[in-house]
Amino acid sequence: MGLGFGRLVDVDDLWLAGHGGTAAPAVRVVGFRAGVEVQRSAWLGLGAESQRVALGFAGIDRVEFQITGVVGRAGWIALDDLRFAPHGQPNAAVVVDFEDLSFRTTLSGSRYRGLDWETGRGFRLPIDDSDVIHAPINPSRDDGDPVAEENSVPGMTAGLTPTPVTVWENFVGPMRGDPGAGFIPPDSCGAVGPDHYLSIVNTNLSAFTKTTGARVLNVSLNSFFGSTGTTGDPRAVWDPHAGRFIVLATTFSGGSLIYIGVSRTADPTGAWFKFNFNTAQGTDAGKWPDYPTLGVDARGIYTSAYMVGTGSLMTIWAIDKAPLVAPAPSLGTITAFRSLTWEGAIQPCVTYGDPGAEWFVSRASSTSLRLRRVNPPLTAPTQQSVALITVPSHSSPPLAPALGSSPGLNPIDTRPMNAVFRNGSVWTIHGVSSGGRAACRWYELDVSPTVLVQNGTITDPLWHYYFGSIAVDAAGNVGLGFSGSHAGVYASTFVTGRHATDPSGTNAPPIMTKAGEGAINHVDGSGRNRFGDYSHINVDPVDDLGFWTIQEYGGTSNNWKTWIARFGYETVLYGDGLAGTTGVPTLATTARPKINSTVTLRMGNSVGAATGCVLVIGVATSAVPILGGTLLVAPMITEGVALPSPSGTIGIPYPNSPALVGQPVYYQTVQIDAGAAQGLSFSRGLEVRADSR
């Protein structure tokens, strides 16, 4: 049963016992604010003797008593001495002791003591014993207009095949059961730095070495921030300007605080500068933030949230970064821009370069995205809505079926998941419906002029894809990470991308990085099977080319897990080869290329027997017709190779020179093959860009 207070209150304690011949064996108390669960007690075993239950619920407007059933699926509890006070006014506490009531007085449906005494709902809904974080709040319930879309294979456009990414490293990330990580869903987020990958989930912070995947930091968010209650809705970004990690979280347990940490160096296991600020000020007084976002540019740190209790209004905060990254860090100016129209999520960009202001993107309607900017100086910034950009019509993604999950996994709505600014464009991604399935749609928006440059949809005739994230590297290549499933498989993790030279609006077919291991069934009180609520991806700052992403997948025993993957376009095939006896000869590296190492090339044999081969190496491309084929490399070095069948390898030493990091080197093989048009077969060109580690 539920009990409404009609206003925000702080509930201190109460007394409970089992009652009568059908006494409930156990009870827990759940606190709500504006219809959203924000606090809950542990399960309490009940007996005939009344016992005090210390709750300490702050800033709630309703409590719900949930019980485990007995024979006949009914149970009774005795309630006494309910102590509560108006929120933030402990000296005004009152105690409801029921001394003025006569025997068998019915309270259900009454307004006794000015409270709303509800009728219990019985056992119609399952009770999830997990700590389920409330779903993102959508006060407008705008799901967009129904849209009919093509059931196309992602990235496949009229004979054009977009360039596939290569996945280099994979390892398991945080999972349910890690310190602090007992909550559902994880809200998977993370960022990569020079030597570490930093992950942040509900409610755990971990760091892993990039070279081995070894975990070197594993701590609850409460321990990290020194916070109380439930600290979640976490975010993390890498600041490409200051070379620092930035993390953010908020509290669900009666607070209106946003917590932020800035690493003192590029090492997340070292010192951090941490602070928090109260969001419930000005017109947001008495409200609390939901679904905070996180972005950074050369001057500031930015976040935005829906302020629950304001109706349908949002707030942006701009935080002056200079004092935070000073040798003796301190908190500087925090500026709030309040009472902005609800648009799901206002995503600040992770900004590369300096466009002169910080850009934000949000979904204004089913056919438009809004661009905003916050202008410096950060000691007195200004905010402006710059443009509404027309985009293809879309609607919210449907539930995503997954093996053993009932109902389907909830992909929430059409709010943007993250945003990046690079080379004059804002890039973002969100969930949509495509052919009746959940899909991820991405956009490139030019800021001058403010127009849609291109968009694409990651969709499939069978698979549902959801909770996508997007990043862009120094060469203009796009990396995309997301989860996916269909009725025959558990929720799994995926990546894809688009090379800068690919046709506009296309992306390569997805590559699965981790197959799901088990079903997810975490149904909240509103009947939603909770998964998500987002993921993240960013570019490796070492070479500014490789992408690192973190995604959720289904683990065993109804537990969530996360998977961290590195992928990218360090090696890319280009041009057209010329077939020999068995086809066009293949050419690839056997591992991610790095300086101060030997890069091994595997050369496929097109003859089917040992033959002579020439490996052509250069630092520029070419397009010279020769003997029926095309020489795709401007030759600097040629190496004769006796090539066995079906393939052979050759080692190419890369010196320990930082100047080589990210710089292209081109390769092509030419083989003696009587089955070729003029006796020579040609591989496609192979572009290789080395990393430093």
Image (spheres, rainbow, N blue to C red):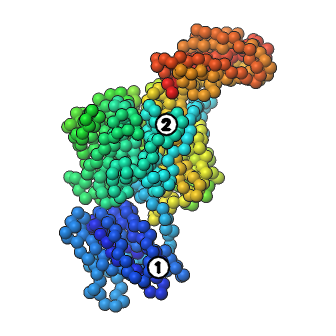
Q: Residues within 10 Å of mark 1 (few under 14, many from 20)?
A: many
The amino acid marked with disc number 2 is Thr
Q: Secondary structure at mark 1?
A: loop
Q: Position of residue 165 (x, y in %)?
A: 57, 32
Mark number displayed over residue 24: 1
Marks 2 and 1: which is nearer the front? 2
- The residue where tag 2 is placed is 209
The amino acid marked with disc number 1 is Ala
Q: Position of residue 72 (x, y in %)?
A: 54, 82
Q: Residue at x 36, y 89 (%)?
A: 104
Residue 213 in view here = yes
Q: Position of residue 5 (x, y in %)?
A: 29, 71
Q: Residue at x 23, y 75 (%)?
A: 94
The vertical placement of 349 against 141, above or below, is: above
Query: Of label 2 and label 1, which has the lower sequence position?
Result: 1
Q: Secondary structure at mark 2?
A: strand
Q: Residues within 10 Å of mark 2 (few under 14, many from 20)?
A: some
Q: Quadrant of the N terminus?
A: bottom left
The vertical placement of 574 against 60, above or below, is: above
Q: Quadrant of residue 633?
A: top right
The vertical placement of 159 against 78, above or below, is: above
